[in-house]
Every structure is written in C-alpha cells, then in structure tokens.
Image: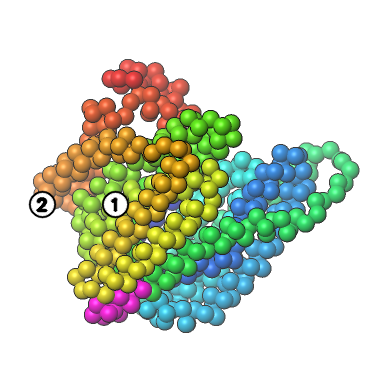
Amino acid sequence: MLKGAAALALAGLIIKVGNLLVRLPLTRMVGSEGLGIYQMALPAYNALLHLAVGGVPVAVQNLVAEYNARGRRDVMHRVLHLALTYALLAGAAAACLLLIGAPFLARALGDARSYWPLVALAPAIILNGLDSVFRHYMQGQKQMTPSAVASVLEQGTKIAVTMGAAVLLLPLGLEYAAAGAALGITVGALASVLFMLWRVRREREEDEAGDAPREERQMPRGLGVRMLRLAWPVTLGSVTMPLLNVLDVSIVQRGFLKAGYPPAQATALYGAFAGIAVQVVWFPFVLTNAVANATVPTLTAAQARGDMEAVRQRVVMGLRTASLICLPVAIGAMVLAAPIALLFGEPLAADPLRHLGPVALLGPLTWMTVAQLQALGETGAPMRNLTLAMGLKLALDGLLAPIRGIDVNGVATASVAMFFTALWFNARELERLLQEPVPWGRILMGPTVASLVMGAGLAGLIAALWGTAGRVEALAVAAVVAPLLYGGTLVATRSITRTELLAMAGPLAPRLERWLAILWPWS
C-alpha cells in the first residue's frame, strides 16, 4: 500500500513541478491576460468531465477489487468493457454539449475569447474519461505503478504540446495561444490512454497465455446496473464543486468589470490569481494526498476492529504530517510572494499570492479531513461542508470583487475563508466520531514556530540578496536555506522526534533508523 502511494506521490510531484516549470515560460509568453483566458475554460471542462464520467471509475475500482479477490477475471474484464462503453458514450455527449454551448458559455464567463480554449478541451472529456476508467481498473488490482507511469507520460506530452502550440498560435492572438495551451491537455490525455490501452492489452494476453482452459461460468446479473448505482452518488457529489467553480469564475470576472477594469485587465487579474497564485499554494497538496491515501485504509481497518485509540492516533498523525509539510509552504508563499511573481514575469500575482498563502495549509488539511471522514464512513458530511463553504466564497466574491483596490485580494481572502470554514465543520465531525477534541495545539504549534523562524530568515535573506544577486540566484539560495532553517528549528524545539519521523517514513524506516540513532539528539 505504501509503495503504491509512494509511486503515485512521486508521479504527482513530477506533475506539479512540470506544471510550475511550464507556467514560467507560458506566463512570460502570453502574460496574465492569456493565462486568464486559458484558466477560464478549465472549470467548465472539469464540470462536464465529472458530470459525464463522475463516479464510474470509482465503481470500477470497487467492483474489480471485489471480483479480483474472488478470482473472477472474466467479470473484471466485463466490468472494464461496460465502463469503457459508458465513458465513451457519456464523454462524447458531454464533448458535443461543450462544443455547441461554447459560444454562450464564453460570453457567460465574461470573456468571449475563452471560446477557442473551450473547443480545444472538448475531446479531452472523452479521452480523460477513458483514461480514468483504465487507471482505476489497474488500481482495483492494487497495481499503482501503471497509473504513475501514465501520469508522467501525460505530463511530458502536455508540456511539449502546450509550449509548441502556444508558440505557433501566438501570432494569431492571445485566445489562439490559450487554445494551444488547452490542446496540451487533450494530447496529453491521448498519450495516457494509448499507454493504458497497451498495458491492459498486455495484461489480457498474459492472462490468456497463463490460464489453463476452464469451464465457462455464468456472468453476474445486473452488473451494469450495480456499477451505475455505485457511481451516481459519487458523480452527484463530485460535480457540485466544478459547477460552483464555473459560477465563481463568472462572478469574479464580472466583479472585476464592475470595479472599473477593462475586460483585458480583468482577465489578466484572474489569470494572475488562478494561473499563478493558486498553482503555487496547491503545490504541497500532492504530498498530503499521498499521505491520505496511505492512512485511509489503516483508518478503516482500525475502525472495523473497534480500536478507537488506533483511529485517533492515525487521524492525528495524518493531520500532523500535513501541517509539517504545508505550514512552511504557506509562510514561504507569503514571504516570497513578490520574488515568486517576478520569477513568473507577472507582478500582478504578488498580492493575491500573499493573501492566498494560508490556503497552502488550510486546503490540504481540509482534504485530509475529507479523506479521514470518508474512511470512517461519513461520506455525505464532507461534501455538504464543502458545498456550504463554497457558498460562502461565492457570496464573498460577489461582495468583494467589485470593490476597486480590494478586488483580486478579496477573492483570495474569500478562498481562505472557504477552506477555513470547511475545515472547521469537518473537524467538528471528526471530534464527534473520535469522541474527543482534535489536539490542534500538538498538531500546529511546533510547525508554526519553525515556519515563522524560517519566514523571518527568508525575509532577511531576500532583502540582503535581492539588490546584489539575480532574482533566480536569490530564490535558489532561499530554496536551500529554507529547509535548513525549518528542519533545524523543528529539531531544536523538539517539535518532531525520531520516533515520529520513523513512523512517517513507512517502508524506509528500517534503513533510516540506524543513521537517525546517531544523528538525532532524542527519540
């Protein structure tokens, strides 16, 4: 389980780094305005993708895991066939809907130039639906590596096509360059589908070559109906947030226009917020998501045994690990907001990044509590809490975005309020299930002190180097110094112990233990 989570985490980390690296030249090429045109199309695409395919991949994973345990590979293949057929038909319908509605949707989003990116993303609905079914089919057999390889292949293809198409189409206008960037998503999905198709076919050939002839067994009745029954509740839940995000884009963009910004500048503001600031603060999510994937099965097992003490320990360990990873990112994003924005070549991103910094902690903590609640059987409460929190964000965006001088910073603050609200509600649900308060002092105190020390050191370092060294060189030095300051303070204040580090290391613990016994001052 941990090796599979590590493979997914490594692939996710490569994807995050790739996304940030491609944003640098892309932002310098098309600016915040072009990035804003591209970002506007994504929520509508995500909403239709979730609506079309939604929970089918999750249902596939559950059914494949069940019949794999029974040794019924014939049923597993039937499940895959049914799911691919559904994903192809539903994805094609959603893609046609996006193509037909693109002109109206582009105007509703507040910038008609988002039309071509929407068109470029339409085929990706079909391809990503098929890709998700393939990946969950393999994951249902506890094979995580194919998904990780497909993710890296998809990202590499996406980067190459995004940059190439954007360069070729930029002379035609920003909207065409943004469409070229969106085309990278579509071609990347195609590369992943082709790889997964090859991987599944190879598995089928190995099954046919290795299995001895056996008598035909009857296929379970109502398999397709059962798959849809498992899928639709997840679909209805997963489509809520993307639909609300589409509404949010429209509210924010129209708010900027009401604040007196010209359409091009309003789009540039949104691009700086969604295309740069949001991407930076969500960087640590891939690591905390891997931690959640590793701890969720152990939570479920401990609850099934009735071992509430083990459940409490795992909940605290997950939240504490998330805080150790994310708090320094939150402080670093606020302290280094201006240098990071200049690195992207877009000063407009500095203020929203500074205001959005807390989301680097609150967002991953929220999703950690969502995973923990779902592992403990509370599947409806997290989605209800997120929907209520998103409603608060929509209200705040509608109130703050039209105020000149607050505008994009108000939108960033609304995001902080949304995740804080969702986290607060989720924490109350956890406390009810655990039958005791969540020890937030133990979870946050040590990492907060270490992060503040790190932030103060970084602020002084950047102030000293910014005028003498180059921007890239100053940030490179900060990237080296930051973990030393943070880790050193954690050790000096005994905010993390050798025992905790070994617990977090999972399968690497035996190799680390003898070295840590020498280097670590206390257990």
Q: Nearer the viewer, mark 1 or mark 2?
A: 1
Dominant SS in magenta:
helix
Q: Secondary structure at mark 2?
A: loop
User: Is residue 253 found inside the magenta-colored segment of the image?
Assistant: yes
Looking at the image, residue 232 sits to the left or right of residue 464; the answer is right
Residue lying at 37% horizontally and 50% vertically, measured from the top left: 424
Does 233 sit above or below residue 285?
below
Which quadrant of the view contains residue 287?
top left
Which quadrant of the view contains residue 261?
bottom left
Residue type at mark 2: give it: Gly
The image position of residue 71, as x and y in percent, is 76, 39
Does 314 sit above or below residue 287?
above
Looking at the image, residue 373 sits to the left or right of residue 428; the answer is right
The image position of residue 151, as x and y in percent, is 51, 51
The image position of residue 482, as x and y in percent, is 24, 40
Q: Residues within 10 Å of mark 2 (few under 14, many from 20)?
A: few
Residue lying at 74% horizontally and 51% vertically, measured from the top left: 77
Q: Is residue 197 visible?
A: no
Tell which of 380 and 485 is nearer to you. 380
The C terminus, quarter of image: top left
Instruction: Give the magenta range.
Output: 251-266
Q: Which residue is mark 1?
A: 358
Q: Residues within 10 Å of mark 1 (few under 14, many from 20)?
A: many
Residue lying at 38% horizontally and 24% vertically, measured from the top left: 499
Residue type at mark 1: give it: Pro
Q: Which residue is mark 2?
A: 467
Tell which of 102 and 210 is nearer to you. 102
| Real-space CA distance between mark 1 and mark 2, rounded to the nearest whole angstrom | 28 Å
Q: Secondary structure at mark 1?
A: loop
